Image: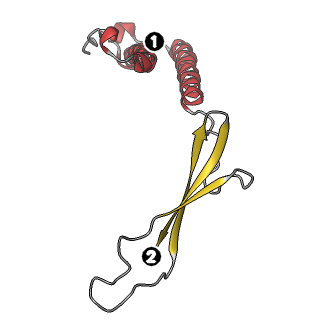
Amino acid sequence: MQAVPALDLSTILTAQRAGVQALMETVAALTDITRRQEYLIAELNHALHGKRAEKLTGDERQLAFEDLSIALAEVETEKETRTAKAESGATRPAPNCTIGNLPAPLPRIEEVIEPGSLICPCGCGVMHKIGEDRSERLDIVPVQLRVIVTVRPK
């Protein structure tokens, strides 16, 4: 297994340092869990397939399996708690935003963007309005909130 090279966290943006540090800690913890599981597997293989002189009786083998199963259960519960902790930290509650209409009591300033010319470019006459697109965006003026409505006639 390769050793993870040490990272110089000073080269990473301040906002991302905490995330990188958390990931490095998670990798180290998972590496420890993996080593422990590899050890448990080696112990199990030794208990099953050891040298003839070192083979255990049925009762001794059962005790070894119980010890191994207890150790394995401890590793699994530790892994589950780490996973639960990582998931709870990674999921943030959704921001409380309203997508769609802005509140009606806010004052609105309507800007209509007219085309440069009302004469049809193909020469068939004067164009007339067939609809419009409306978009609203929140404009924050110090001490005053207002909604700017942009109308684009079609």
Q: Secondary structure at mark 2?
A: loop
What percent of the width, then of the height, locates residue 127?
Answer: 40, 84
Image position of 115 with respect to 46: above or below? below
137 on left or right of 36: right
Residue 81 quadrant: top right
- Of all residues shown, which one is farthest toward the bottom? 124
Q: Amino acid at mark 2?
A: Lys
Q: Amino acid at mark 1?
A: Leu
Residue 86 quadrant: top right
Label 1 environment density (alpha carbons within 10 Å; few <14, some 14–19, many ≥20): some
What percent of the width, then of the height, locates residue 29?
Answer: 45, 14
123 on left or right of 104: left
Task: Work out which quarter of the rendered image holds the C terminus and state it.
Answer: bottom left
Can residue 37 be seen at all in this image of the molecule?
A: no
What percent of the width, then of the height, locates residue 105?
Answer: 75, 52
Colour setting? secondary structure
Q: Nearer the viewer, mark 2 or mark 1?
A: 2
Label 2 environment density (alpha carbons within 10 Å; few <14, some 14–19, many ≥20): few
User: Residue placed at 37% from the left, 16% from the top?
Assistant: 42
Q: Which residue is mark 2?
A: 154
- Of all residues shown, which one is farthest toward the right? 105
Q: Secondary structure at mark 1?
A: loop
**Of residues 86 and 69, which is closer to you in this image?**
86
Can residue 79 be seen at all in this image of the molecule?
A: yes
What percent of the width, then of the height, locates residue 84?
Answer: 58, 27
Q: How many marks?
A: 2
**Of residues 59 and 148, which is closer to you in this image?**
148
**Of residues 34 and 47, which is closer to you in this image?**
34
Q: Which residue is mark 1?
A: 56
